[in-house]
Image (cartoon, rainbow, N blue to C red):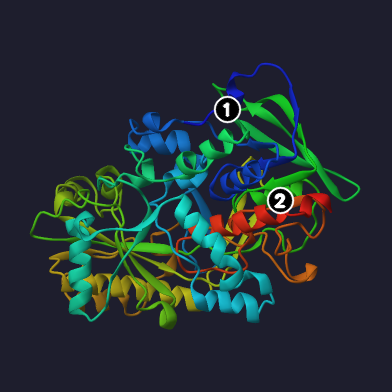
Amino acid sequence: MISRLLRGREVDRPFDASADVVVVGSGAGGAVVARELARAGRSVIVVEEGGYWAPEQYAAMTPSNTFRRMAREAALGAALGLGATPLVSLMSGKCVGGSSVLTGGVCFRVPDEVLHGWVHHLGLRDMGAGPLEPHVRAIEDAIHVETVPDHLRSRGTELFVEGAARLGIPMKPLRRNTAGCRGEARCNFGCPHRAKMSVDISMLPDACAHGAEILSDALVERVELARGRATGVRGRFLDGVTGEPRVPFAVRAPVVVVACGALHTPVLLRRSGLRSRLLGRGLTLHPSTRVYGLFDERVDGWDGAFQSAYSDHFFESHGITLMSAYGPPSLLAAGFPGVAARHRRYVRRIPNTAVFGAMVHDEGGGRVRRWLSREPLVTYRMAARDLGRLFEAIRILARIALAAGAREVVLPVFGAPTVRTARDLEAVLTPLPDARRVECVAFHPLGSARMSAEARDGVVRTSGEAWEAKGLFVADGSVLPTSIGVNSQLPIMAIARKIAHGIADGAMRS
């Protein structure tokens, strides 16, 4: 359980506090920083805009209620596609524990070829495999990263593996941060059995046990700067009924760590006075898509781990990672074509449906800007290379479904007919449809306040400290210098641990 928690929605008078470190955001990056610095003997206050929901509370929520209460914009956020780019749905958490609570728990290390590029092309000498290795290992131990056993594979995943094998595409077991998984495919809505070691279970309780405090329902509106140095944060607690900012608070600290995620960190830093021309630019998303395979046999894809197998067979050549996945029937139903009787015909076949997914290692054509509300304006222009990769991913997934024996395949192209044969598939994809018709989603926004070896090339140093302000650090997905092509939870946490140890080892004295 998380102790030392102050629920801002219950506060009715101005709040003022001081600490050695204030951390803005309690997700994968912020929770790690809080834990490491609290363990190092620093006084730490974590400030989180979202509310706190105990595991037993979110375990009882329906998927739609989870999104309404714990996801940002009720999971209806999006990056607006520019030019030929599709609209990309964006899902991120807004709760104590952040997106970590609402992920599938998949844990990848940064691919070696990506790290090589960081070191040799970008000059980030201390971001290679060697310097990061102890932090990766420590995080893997702390959050119990383990390989998903074959017996937890759903029948949908087995079909994915079988279809791929018939096409000569090897599949591998995924690694996830779980302990005692029962295979109920609820990972993205909060594990009902505390088996997923999200940071609200694995990191924040440890931080609190070492003295850290957490403020929930607390919107930070500005990082306070004086003479080029961070001095704390100011904001307002959110009303428990309306959700609007109400009671003011301030936390004074010589070290401020911003960990709001790649979509909100740039907004806060810009509002606080940072002027880097690269702030909010270079956003990467790992655009993802899926196909539905409809089979004669009963699949019951919800019986098994939410994600348990993947393939990197096309990663080097096409930047595509294939991924098993599933979803609640209520969400799957929304992806079927047709209306009225035709739509109901497909919905009735959900027990016979398998879902196969893929994501693209993108170049990064996204931008985050301040907007009229608390939410940013996110735009994204997909490179021509990546648009080609997106359609190639759809083609590969559909071929796998057909090879696995699917009688019908639903493509993620609005208005496209379903396909029953390889010839049908090529008829739909030749010529390629308008990419703006592709159903696309993303879960890994990265790179909007990226690290750099020189101030002109980024927003923060490899230490995580902002080039423009001493004592101001960033420790979330926004600092990753490029897309990585794989799920980002473990890399974010490892880099956050590295940043935290740098702070503890002397950055606070500079």
Front position in the image: 422 or 414 = 422
Q: Read off the residue under disc 2.
A: 504
Label 2 or label 1, whichever lies nearer to me, is 2
Q: Residue furthest top?
A: 12
Q: x and y percent of residue 206 in the render?
A: 53, 39
Q: Quadrant of the C terminus?
A: bottom right
Q: Dividing the picture into quarters, in which one does residue 170 lie?
A: bottom left
Which mark is on residue 5? 1
Q: Residue furthest right?
A: 227
Q: Residue at x 28, y 53 (%)?
A: 326
Q: Residue at x 48, y 73 (%)?
A: 111
Does residue 154 show up?
Answer: yes
Q: x and y percent of residue 401 in the render?
A: 21, 68
Q: Amino acid at mark 1?
A: Leu
Please state if 117 lies on the left or on the right of 329 as rendered: right
Front position in the image: 485 or 365 = 485
Proximity of marks 2 and 1: CB atoms separated by less than 8 Å: no
Q: Dividing the picture into quarters, in which one does residue 373 lie?
A: top right
Does residue 424 lie above or below 56 as drawn?
below
Front position in the image: 454 or 507 = 507
Q: x and y percent of residue 114 in the render?
A: 54, 75
Please state if 203 lies on the left or on the right of 251 as rendered: left
Front position in the image: 408 or 140 = 140
Does residue 444 show up?
Answer: no
Q: Residue at x 18, y 50 (%)?
A: 350
First in sequence: mark 2 vs mark 1: 1
